[in-house]
Amino acid sequence: AFTADAATRSITPRHLLSHSSGLPNWRDEADEPLTSAFAPGTRFRYSGEGFVLLGRLVEAVSGQTAAQVVETRILRPAGMGRSTYGWARGTAPPVAWAHDGGGVVLV
């Protein structure tokens, strides 16, 4: 849940996309209040929670899943027919998987 402070009320989708919302990367507890650590747009701080929130916002506004919106409105029009929004185990190559510093795949 958001707190009702001025900083969280002024967060825009652009802030969420640019990781400048001030929201944390992840909270320790799901029921912990979601608060902004700084005024939106003034600094950069990676925010995984911000992207989750943005996905929920896209779903609420569009009536589609975030994956459907990204794939139909961004990837397909850009000619990226083999790209997807999410990942799944067993996805056939070519796939760019995340790796740790030692080269181990992180999936």
Image (spheres, rainbow, N blue to C red):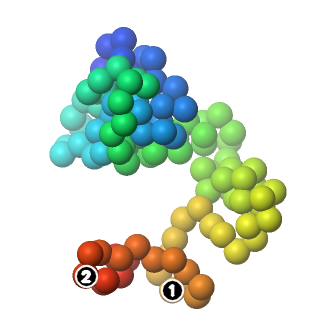
Relative image position of residue 48 (x, y in whole percent): 37, 48
The answer to whether one can see residue 24 in this image is yes
Relative image position of residue 66 (x, y in whole percent): 60, 50
Q: CA distance from mark 2 to mark 1?
A: 22 Å
Q: Residue at x 51, y 77 (%)?
A: 96
Relative image position of residue 81 (x, y in whole percent): 75, 71
Q: Residue furthest left?
A: 28
Evaluate if marks 2 and 1 touch, with contact meaning CB atoms under 8 Å apart. Answer: no
Q: Secondary structure at mark 2?
A: loop
Quadrant where the C terminus sits is bottom left
Residue identifier under label 1: 90
Q: Quadrant of residue 98?
A: bottom left
Q: Secondary structure at mark 1?
A: loop
Above or below, comparing residue 55 to residue 32 in the picture = below
Residue identifier under label 2: 102
Tag 1: Cα neighbours inside 10 Å, few (<14), some, or many (≥20)? few
Q: Quadrant of residue 2?
A: top left
Q: Residue at x 78, y 59 (%)?
A: 78
The answer to whether one can see residue 30 in this image is no
Q: Earlier in the sequence, mark 2 or mark 1?
A: 1
Quadrant where the N terminus sits is top left
Tag 2: Cα neighbours inside 10 Å, few (<14), some, or many (≥20)? few
Specify the amino acid type for callout 1. Gly
Above or below, comparing residue 28 to residue 13 in the picture = below
